[in-house]
Amino acid sequence: MRTKSMINKINPRHFFLIDGLGALLSTFLLGFVLVKWQDAIGMPTSRLYLLATIAAVFCLYSLCCFFSGVKNWRRYLRIIAVSNLAYCVLTTGFMMYEYANLTALGMLYFVSEIIIIVTLAIIELRIAKFGRKVAV
């Protein structure tokens, strides 16, 4: 119940900031940290760079939406939420394709990232549909 009240107190526009900062963290982890530890993760560097590039684009989009104060924020929030879900589908596909090469640490990272992003995307879609009155 506490989560619901916390979410309802957040300005819906701030979800762009949350999303943008999360995408920035993903960009850094995928494009710099995990690339250096590729042997410990098992995902090829080309796929890590692709995921990092997509995360960087999402970061720019979300932060631009936040700082520009878009008027039709529901539409833009829906766009990033659906894009985040598509990113998770792509990541899952990469995990399935590289399953034999992924280490336990790699699986842990990608599953954790997917859980966090899907949770955020679901909240964003609910906020875009219902405004602040969101049941979580």
Image: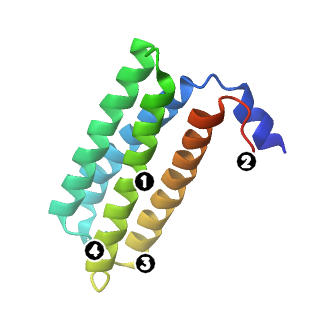
Q: Determine crowd level at label 3: few under 14, some 14-19, many 20+ residues with C-alpha closer than 10 A.
A: few
**Residue at mark 2 to residue at mark 4: CA–CA distance:** 35 Å
Instruction: Tell which circle, 4 or 3, labels the residue nearer the N-terminal end.
Output: 4
Q: Amino acid at mark 4?
A: Gly
Query: Which mark is in front, 2 or 4?
Result: 2
Q: Mark 3 = which residue? A: 104
Do the numbered discs 2 and 4 sit on residues whose CB atoms are within 8 Å?
Answer: no
Q: Mark 1 = which residue? A: 85
Q: Mark 2 = which residue? A: 136
Residue occupying the point 33% across, 30% down: 61
Residue 26 visible, this angle: yes
Q: Amino acid at mark 1?
A: Leu
Query: Which mark is in front, 1 or 4?
Result: 1
Q: Mark 4 = which residue? A: 42
Instruction: Tell which circle, 1 or 3, labels the residue nearer the N-terminal end.
Output: 1
**Residue at mark 1 to residue at mark 4: CA–CA distance:** 23 Å
Instruction: Tell which circle, 1 or 4, labels the residue nearer the N-terminal end.
Output: 4
x and y, in percent, of residue 43 in the image: 26, 70
Question: Which residue of the protein is positioned furthest toward the right in this rendering?
Answer: 1
Residue occupying the point 51% across, 28% down: 74
